[in-house]
Structure formats: C-alpha cells, structure tokens
Amino acid sequence: MTVLITGASTGIGRELTKIFAKNGYDVVITARSKKKLDELSKDIEKFSSSKVTVIEKDLSCINSGKELFCKIKEKGIVVDILINNAGVGDTGFFFESNIDKIINMLELNIKNLTILTRLFSSEMAHRKNGRILNVASTGSYMPGPFIAVYYATKAYVLSFSEAIREELRDFNVKVSVLCPGATITEFSKGAHKLDLKGAMTAEKVAYIAYNKFMKGKAVIVPGYFNRVGIFFSKIMPRKLVGSIIGKSQKKLHEGFMTKNSHIG
C-alpha cells in the first residue's frame, strides 16, 4: 500500500513518513525542499525496504495540487492513503500582514488541500477503499487574534473533514482530522512566533496520530492538556477565548521579533 504525505520534509510530516515506512508502507513524499526530502529518503533506506518516491512541489502555488496529482498518475502510483499535512501560518496584526503570504496560506492550507482530497477521494470511492488524514489544529475550535488567517483556515479543515467523512462512509473511505496543539517544528519560525512552553515533540504527535488514524478515529487531538483546552473553548464565551488567545499569540510574536530583530 502507498501513502502520500505532503509537507513531509520536516516536523509531523517527516515523523509520519518514518512511521509508515517502518510499518511496511511505500511512501510518496512531497514538499518544497528536495534536499530535505532526499535526506529523509536516505534515512528511511537505513531501516526499511519501503519504496520512497520524492516529488518536489510547492503547494502554496496556484494549481500545484492538480499538478501533483497528475505527476503521481504519470508515475502509475495508486495512492491508498492521503495525508494532507502541509501548512503554513503567520502572526502579527492582520492589517499589517503580507498579502502575498496570506494568498499562499489560503492556497496551501485550504485550496490545494481541498483539491487533493477531491481528486484522490474520487479514486478511493470508486475502489471502495482508502484513508484520508487532514491536519488541522486545536486553533480550529477558537478565534485567533494575531494569528487570525491561520486559525480560520484550520477551522475550515476541521469542518470540511468532518463533513466528507460522512459522505464517504458508505464508500469505505475513512476520513480523519488531526488537531495538534503547540508542536516543536519549523512552523513557529515560519509564522514569526516563539514555541509555546510545554509544546509536544513532532515525534510524539505523529505516533499518536498514526495509531488513532489507523483505528479510524474521526478527530484526533494529541495531548491531555490540548483536549482540556478545546473543552473549555467550547463552554467559555467566544469573546473571552479570543482575548486569551490574542494575548498569548501577541506575546509569542513580539518575543520572536525581539529575538530576531533583523527580520522585517
């Protein structure tokens, strides 16, 4: 069986790739950095006989989802499991944010995730077999001042995934959504924020995600405190939740910018 993992070069995507390879799955890995993908491929060769296919692709670009699908079809690869892990964020005042970065975020986090899910789920439905894991965030459940667009994109991913899970149930296609909290990856650096104290390792998040995903769990929230946080976000007034999140994200962003004062 073959697994396609986007954003596989670092973080959760990299760790999931290694776990699937250890369990005997062939993997198709894609990200912007071919160098990092090639390094991952060599690492996998040390402990697994799984076939690794590397495809360099920047999914923040327009039409890149369709291009990736066509590339995989050209290679004659049948994808049994799709993992839409690639994502990007940004922090700071929305009215000061970079418009091009917003466009890239929407392309990557929403548009191409949706396109890839549409194209591969169609094949899975016709075969009446397949699995899809979309990566959202604990931020899917709450407003996110100072990280507004990212949280909004992940709210879309959660709602979308839960909806198509029901649609695909009768076609034996299992859809799950992963909602990790703060995780130690390169995400924070790209989003111009410090890592939150107590953040989980990508390895631990991936391990939990794999086990829950393969058991067919609908929504996967790694970590006790993340689950508690989501619970309270549902019962607390939205205004209060937004205020708490906003203060935290603003502090993390300002701390990063102070530490990296050379970044404009």
Image: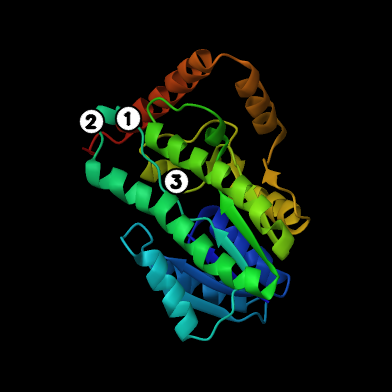
Point out the tag, 2 or 3, that comes first from the N-terminus.
Answer: 2
Give the amino acid at mark 3.
Phe
- Residue 48 visible in the shown view: yes
**Where does residue 82 sit, x and y in percent of width and height?**
58, 64
Contact check, label 2 and label 1, Cβ < 8 Å = yes
Q: Seen in the image, is 199 located left or right of residue 38?
A: right
Q: Seen in the image, is 123 located left or right of residue 146?
A: right
Specify the label residue 159 is tagged with: none
> Where does label 2 land, which residue?
96
User: Residue placed at 46% from the left, 73% from the top?
Assistant: 69
Contact check, label 1 and label 3, Cβ < 8 Å = no
Disc tally is 3
Between circles 2 and 3, the one closer to the viewer is: 2
Q: Quadrant of the N terminus?
A: bottom right
- Frontmost residue, 69 versus 213: 69
Dot 2: what SS?
helix
**Where does residue 5 sit, x and y in percent of width and height?**
54, 64
Point out the tag, 1 or 3, that comes first from the N-terminus.
Answer: 1
Q: Residues within 10 Å of mark 3 (few under 14, many from 20)?
A: some
Q: Seen in the image, is 64 located left or right of residue 72?
A: left
Find residue 190 and report its image quarter: top left
> Where does label 3 land, which residue?
187
User: Residue placed at 32% from the left, 30% from the top?
Assistant: 92
User: Residue placed at 55% from the left, 82% from the top?
Assistant: 77
> Where does label 1 land, which residue?
92
Dot 3: what SS?
helix
Residue sticking out furthest to the right: 215
Q: Is residue 175 above or below residue 26?
A: above
